[in-house]
Amino acid sequence: MKKMKWAVLFAALVSVFGFSSCLDSEEGTSYDLYEYVTVDSYMGAATLVGDQSGITYIPTTKDVLASLELKDGGYYKRALVAIKLAEEFVAGKTSYNISGIQVYNYIPYKSCTMNPDTLKGDYKFINLGAGNEKPWVRSGFANVSFSIQIPNATPSLNDFNMYITGASNDTLYAKLHYSKDNSAAYTSMSEMISFELPQYDPAYNQLNRGDSIVLTVVATGANGELKTTSSKFSFNDLY
């Protein structure tokens, strides 16, 4: 069975970026750390928020985030980056000025669907991420890894959807959906998508407001339902 990654999906996407380029100009630069980040804003300026650390990274100049900037003036929201600090690391500090980044991977992202009844089909996944690849929720994004057979060599992000199905105390439930018929597919892919969670969903009312919530994601598999559960997160991480 042929395997592929998501490179085809980004062939057109990369053309809309305004690179200066961090990847080329900073070759040989040493970095202090790397992590998955979300582009946020602080006092009207773009910043990065780390998934693992929760640290806010504040660029010393606008050019620092040039490799994430879009031609329309916005920013690509999700990426795995190496970060160069512009100040000394101090344990427990919650924000740092940064002088450079290098993008290791642009993470595909999209909003959770609010209209699951409009989705067509419900085709089979090979597996959902577990162990080191289990889901996690930070900065309003649910990050879900999976493997699936695809019917051609040009997978589309539009064919993948996730939606909230309910909640109970410390667990938020969601369904991962694939809409293309892959019953005769011979090509497989493994990927992670960051799904932007709704700003509000009625299910949130059933959750506690603590820091021990988990996300359980299900999907259709070849031999029945697949299921995976995230690491614990705070209610505030939903936003």
Image (tube, grey):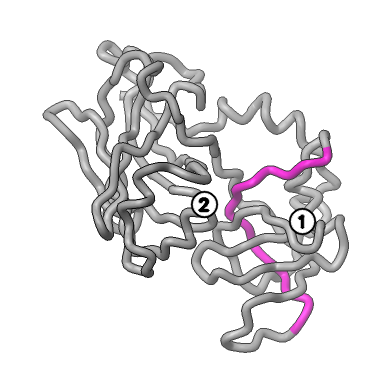
Would you place residue 146 above or below residue 35 in this image? above
Neighbours of disc 1 within 10 Å: few (<14), some (14-19), many (20+): some
Q: Position of residue 94 (x, y in %)?
A: 62, 78
- Quadrant hosting residue 62: bottom right
Residue kind at label 2, given as amino acid type? Gly
Q: Which mark is residue 221?
A: none
Would you place residue 16 above or below residue 84 in this image? above
Q: Quadrant of the N terminus?
A: top left
Residue lying at 67% horizontally and 24% vertically, measured from the top left: 12
Q: Quick check: marks 2 and 1 in contact, CB under 8 Å?
A: no
Q: Secondary structure at mark 2?
A: loop
Magenta range: 73-87
- Quadrant hosting residue 144: top left
Q: Which mark is residue 46?
A: 1
Q: Earlier in the sequence, mark 2 or mark 1?
A: 1
Q: Which mark is residue 140?
A: 2
Q: Secondary structure at mark 1?
A: strand
Q: How many marks?
A: 2
85 in magenta: yes
**Image-based side of 236 in relation to 219, left or right:** right
Would you place residue 180 above or below residue 40 in this image? above
Q: Position of residue 182 (x, y in %)?
A: 31, 16
Q: Position of residue 19 (x, y in %)?
A: 81, 42
Residue kind at label 1, given as amino acid type? Ala
